[in-house]
């Protein structure tokens, strides 16, 4: 069990002594539990209904992705990254392809960059929609799930038309794209933007001022910006705690610097603020998609990359703003066709560390809300 | 493209010669790409300050536009503390390792750090031998907790003073550390199927 003292640099305002009596109850949640979105086991230490502390047991989905990478060529490993955060496969692919491109010192041509941004932002949207539906479902609101899945379907249809796959898309290649945008791609994307913009208002109508939603999310799972930074938490969780930091702005990759968008932040760092931040992020994603689809240049979609990808000896760390936070790839090349070492810095894994801090002093039912609001994907936690 | 060129010459020569020539021709375009950029010295006020304090214990380099420093093992955790407290590298992005079995000091241990105030990313790298322990950086960045556990799980590098030094992704009873280069995947797999399924090999 994690001793509260070991987290001393944090602002822990949870009581050291039990609230009611000394009867500590240890219960087990998961690994098979509908609210853990996968196989996450949480050992809860309770005093009545209050959480004194918890420990996560992970690794049930461990597939050894980093070891697999050492035994595959750079090109062969590309589809594997889709299987980590499988609800945001396009983002994973973007991070990986850009990291290898940096090692090779090549850059994807502008047309490829634009299509990449469109698909990645569509995927961010899909990831947030899936998060919203399941998170609301966990807390007891069933309707948002149907709304968000109905609209997410339109994104998956665009993916399917573009590359033939809906979930694990393998949309990008090292150096650019394999597929040219299909006929009517721009039209489909524009139609989607105008279709989904009023739908986000619908989600908000269901939840933003809903009294039950407010009761279940306001003041739940509060974490300060300072604690987020200390625990390495990134993404919407960090922004909801008031830290205005997004890699798309801080260290722009792809061609995000060409687009006009805002980074939403919250004030209280609670579950409700994280909800609001993600809602604004969806709208901002649409803004980026709109600008990108209006400005797709003509030209090649693939940079000059040798058929056999053989990066020179070196090391690279490249990270992108995935829907869940900072997704980084650290690749060591020994000059051969296979990565000597490939490390994935998964946002879900690092963010999940904060669960303990966020749940202390909360009720058991809030643990479900906090797991949902962290937006973890166990495929990425365990890799 | 290369196949058409040797043909007139090869017609008079021995037919076997174009064959070894072909891989050589295919290999020809590779060397200039393979040479690639090499790490160069990295100079900045931060580096100058640290150099002044620790001298030859630090080798600051820059490669592909990214800065990192190779640091002497004995300077850990002092240098990490300085980076965190004085230089505002308040976000520990990642801790990871790489295994080089042929080297005397078999492991590279790497910290990826980021500073919100400076919007700057650096890497700190040390080399350690098998069996060496490293002071834990959990007191500096609580984020290091799970990251160090993963390094231990995958490489068997132990961190002194870590609050909970145990495996994280693999089960507690697991044998070996998979990301070491000498870890036998097939051996592990065969052993498992022999015990659990009663068959010789799972392949």
Image: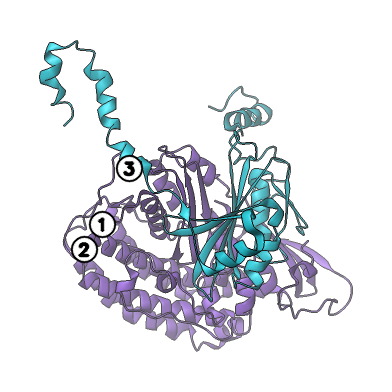
Chain colours: A purple, B cyan
Give neighbour class at mark 2: few <14, some 14-19, many 20+ (Cα, 10 Å). Answer: some
Observer-side mark, 2 or 1, equals 2
Q: Residue furthest left?
A: B8
What is the spatial separation of the Cα atoms under label 3 and label 2, in whole angstroms? 36 Å
Residue A36 in sight: no
Of all chains, the one bearing label 2 is A
Whether label 2 touches label 1, CB < 8 Å: yes
Separation (CA) of disc 2 from disc 1: 8 Å
What residue would you read off at disc 2?
A185
Is A107 placed left or right of A131 in the picture?
Answer: left
Residue B29 percent across, percent down from the top left: 27, 36
- Identify the residue position indicated by label 3 in the image: B33
Question: Along the line of sight, which residue is nearer the eye, A152 or B96?
Answer: B96
Q: Is residue A65 above or below residue B46?
A: above
Q: Are marks 3 and 2 in contact (CB under 8 Å)?
A: no
What's the CA distance linking mark 3 and mark 1? 36 Å
Query: Residue B51 occupies which quadrant of the picture?
Result: bottom right
The residue carrying mark 1 is: A161
In the depicted structure, whether residue A362 falls above or below residue A382: below
Viewer-closest of B34 and A206:
B34
Q: Nearer the viewer, mark 3 or mark 2?
A: 3
Identified at 26% across, 75% down, the residue is: A291
Local packing at callout 3 (Cα closer than 10 Å; few below 14, some 14-19, many 20+) is some
């Amino acid at each position: 069990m994690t001793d509260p003292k070991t987290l001393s640099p944090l602002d822990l305002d949870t009581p050291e002594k039990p609230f009611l009596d000394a009867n500590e109850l240890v219960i087990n949640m998961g690994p098979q539990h509908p609210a853990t979105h996968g196989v996450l086991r949480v050992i809860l230490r309770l005093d009545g209904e209050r959480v004194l502390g918890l420990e996560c047991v992970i690794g049930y989905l461990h597939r050894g992705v980093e070891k697999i990478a050492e035994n595959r060529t750079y090109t062969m490993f590309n589809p594997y990254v889709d299987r980590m955060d499988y609800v945001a496969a396009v983002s994973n692919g973007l991070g990986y392809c850009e990291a290898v491109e940096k090692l090779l010192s090549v850059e994807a041509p502008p047309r490829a960059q634009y299509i990449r941004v469109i698909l990645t932002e569509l995927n961010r949207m899909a990831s947030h929609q899936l998060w919203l539906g399941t998170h609301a479902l966990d807390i007891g609101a069933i309707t948002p799930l149907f709304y968000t899945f109905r609209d997410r379907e339109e994104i998956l249809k665009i993916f399917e038309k573009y590359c033939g796959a809906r979930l694990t898309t393998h949309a990008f290649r090292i150096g650019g794209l394999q597929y040219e945008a299909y006929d009517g791609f721009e039209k489909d994307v524009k139609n989607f933007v105008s279709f989904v913009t009023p739908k986000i208002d619908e989600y908000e109508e269901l939840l933003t001022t809903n009294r039950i939603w407010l009761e279940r999310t306001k003041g739940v799972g509060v974490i300060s910006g300072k604690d987020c930074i200390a625990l390495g938490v990134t993404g919407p969780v960090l922004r909801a705690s008031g830290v205005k930091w997004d890699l798309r702005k801080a260290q722009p990759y792809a061609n995000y610097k060409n687009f006009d968008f805002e980074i939403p932040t919250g004030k209280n760092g609670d579950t409700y603020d994280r909800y609001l931040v993600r809602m604004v992020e969806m709208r901002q994603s649409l803004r980026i998609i709109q600008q990108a689809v209006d400005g797709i240049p003509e030209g090649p979609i693939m940079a000059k990359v040798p058929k056999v990808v053989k990066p020179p000896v070196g090391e690279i760390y490249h990270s992108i703003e995935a829907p869940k936070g900072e997704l980084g790839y650290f690749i060591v090349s020994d000059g051969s066709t296979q990565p000597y070492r490939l490390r994935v810095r998964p946002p879900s894994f690092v963010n999940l560390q904060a669960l303990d801090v966020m749940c202390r002093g909360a009720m058991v039912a809030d643990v479900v809300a906090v797991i949902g609001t962290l937006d973890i994907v166990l495929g990425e936690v365990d890799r | 493209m290369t196949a058409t060129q040797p043909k007139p010459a090869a017609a008079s020569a021995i037919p076997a010669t174009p064959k070894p020539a072909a891989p050589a021709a295919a290999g020809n375009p590779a060397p200039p790409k393979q040479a690639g950029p090499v790490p160069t010295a990295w100079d900045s006020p931060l580096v100058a300050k640290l150099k002044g304090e620790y001298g030859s214990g630090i080798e600051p380099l820059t490669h592909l536009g990214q800065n990192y420093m190779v640091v002497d093992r004995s300077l850990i955790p002092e240098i990490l503390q300085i980076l965190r407290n004085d230089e505002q590298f308040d976000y520990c992005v990642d801790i990871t390792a790489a295994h080089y079995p042929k080297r005397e000091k078999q492991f590279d241990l790497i910290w990826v750090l980021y500073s919100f105030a400076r919007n700057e990313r650096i890497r700190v790298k040390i080399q350690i031998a098998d069996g060496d322990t490293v002071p834990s950086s959990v007191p500096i960045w609580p984020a290091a907790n799970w990251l160090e556990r993963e390094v231990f799980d995958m490489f068997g590098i132990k961190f002194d003073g870590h609050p909970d030094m145990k495996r994280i992704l693999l089960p507690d009873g697991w044998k070996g550390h998979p990301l070491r280069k000498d870890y036998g995947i097939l051996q592990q797999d065969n052993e498992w199927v022999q015990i659990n399924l009663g068959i010789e090999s799972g392949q």
